[in-house]
Image (cartoon, rainbow, N blue to C red):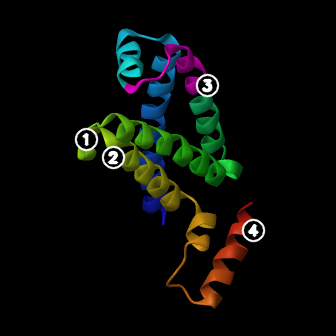
Amino acid sequence: MRKMIWTGRSISGLMIAFLLFDSIIHMTKIAVVVESFTKMGWPIDLAIPLGIVELVCIAVYLYPRTSILGAILLTGYLGGAVVTHLRVGSSLFGETLFPVYVGLLLWGGLYLREPRLRTLLSFWQTSAARVDVRSRAAVQA
């Protein structure tokens, strides 16, 4: 169980580091960001607001009590990136699906480190096992 939690924390940490880097470069408007926004057809004036939205989503994801909501918000944010790449005709398995890969790793890391999510998504557990997990999660909170 400890290895699973630490693996989840490691995966989540890597994804958070990547997303923090992404949000910071949005707010600094470096040349790569300006080029990307131009290629995607977005006005560069949206770079800072998008970076701030991403930072808020990351903060919600990092706070343990709201981590599931944060994952939902980040999934929406990453979905917008997928749609943008589809709209401009980016390569499917490279640029277009990259946000999907990030989202899967975000959810995978959260699943490994968050017992509430494992309880919620427990398709194969018996109802008695679900109750036991819920009671243990309640005691920990």
Residue visible at 56% across and 69% down in the picture? 118
Which class describes the residues within 10 Å of circle 1: few (<14), some (14-19), or many (20+)?
few
First-in-chain label (4 vs 1): 1
3D distance between C-alphas at marks 3 and 4: 33 Å
- Which residue is under mark 4? 138
60 in magenta? no
* Amino acid of disc 1: Gly
Could you tell me residue 124's position as x and y percent? 49, 84
- Which residue is under mark 3? 52
3D distance between C-alphas at marks 1 and 3: 25 Å
Q: Which image quarter: residue 99?
A: top left
Please say if 114 is above or below 24.
Answer: below
Depth check, front residue: 141 or 38: 38
Residue visible at 34% across and 33% down in the picture? 88
Q: Are marks 1 and 2 in contact (CB under 8 Å)?
A: yes
First-in-chain label (3 vs 4): 3
3D distance between C-alphas at marks 1 and 2: 6 Å
